[in-house]
Amino acid sequence: MTPFAIAGVQMYVQALQPNIEGMIQRLDVLMARFPWTQMVLFSELAPYGPLDKFALPPQNDTLSRFCEAARRHRVWLIPGSMFIRQEDGRILNTSYVIDPDGNVIRQYAKMFPFRPYEAGIAAGTEFCVFDVPDVGRFGLSICYDMWFPETTRQLTSQGVEVLLHPVLTGTTDRDAELAIARATAAQFQCYVIDVNGLGSGGIGKSCVVDPTSMVLHQSGGQEDMFPIEVDLDMVRRQRETGMKGLGQVLKSFRDRDVDFDVYDRTSGRDDFLKTLGPLEIPHQGTRAGLHVDPVSEADVPLELDTPALGVAGGGYLHQGIKNQ
């Protein structure tokens, strides 16, 4: 058994004032109550909330305070993420991995900003993989990234065993996101640590999922600190023998007989995607994608015995499709 204790912190996030003091206070309480915790993960944009007007420069006092807190408690710390303004003016949604010595060892910029709603946020292009000595390999993705399985595929193909996933989801698709978290754990045979915020930071429902897709913990809609001990040997065993002795999905992908040319943008396999229209926020009354034609004589049923269904010998003559 290779145990490692990871705690998520689901907390109320303010949008118009910093949340740094509250984060450090909760970290202090967490470590006093559960001193065996070895890594702590906060939700996406927890330090300053969802407004990019609070974007910080790459070198900032907030990061220094988190480094000092990690060093004081001797824990690995991922303090959610922050909007960071680059020298060229681009703003990236950036997360930092801080080791127990208080050093930033990795940083990661969200690859899939929630466009079109986050239209002003630039996309990162580098993956984040890091090792905890004598424990295992960890990877980081942020919120909407997980809706694109290619991101997790890249991480797990590099050996990632635990996917750390800070989230800011305050919308009605949170239940779908929870289903994706479970599917991701099973598809890629890894732990998923999914931490959402409250208030301006989301609607909660954080979760921890093991490699069999079992939910080890599910938060509700209130503040929550949840240290969970994961077992990295379980990941290794499952990847070798399959989930419950069944699907060996990573090895099956490795030994595949097909390459997916949809990822070659010159192949033409994605021509359908080009018909979907621009990536933009819907407006009131939009009928985009419905392609509703006006009713015409061509829509009148032919030899229709069952008008409501258009069956039993009848059919429709429309757009060149004749009754058979």
Image (cartoon, rainbow, N blue to C red):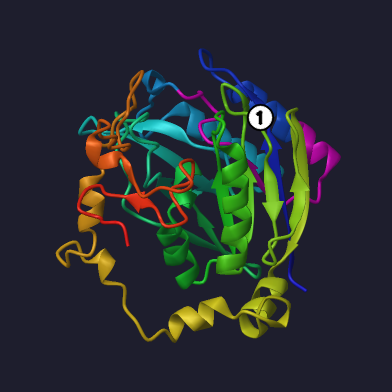
- List the residue tagged with mark 1: 24
Q: From this viewpoint, is residue 182 visible? A: yes
Q: Using residue 71 as the reference point, say whether residue 254 is left or right of it.
A: left
Q: Is residue 105 magenta?
A: no
The percent coordinates of residue 303 (x first, y second) are 36, 50
Tell me: residue 246, above or below residue 286: below
Q: Residues within 10 Å of mark 1 (few under 14, many from 20)?
A: some
Where is the N terminus found, in terms of image quarters?
bottom right
The percent coordinates of residue 208 (x first, y second) are 70, 51
Residue under the image location 35 percent in, 35 percent down = 115
Residue under the image location 42 percent in, 40 percent down = 94
The percent coordinates of residue 173 (x first, y second) are 55, 37
State which region is magenta.
29-50
Q: Residue furthest right?
A: 33
Q: Secondary structure at mark 1?
A: helix
The percent coordinates of residue 135 (x first, y second) are 66, 68
Residue 150: quadrant of the picture = bottom left
Residue 166: quadrant of the picture = top right
The one nearer the camera, 317 or 279, is 317
The one nearer the camera, 26 or 163, is 163
Q: Using residue 90 as the reference point, say whether residue 168 is left or right of it.
A: right
Tell me: residue 79, above or below residue 54: below
Count of numbered circles on the image: 1
| Amino acid type at image mark 1 | Ile
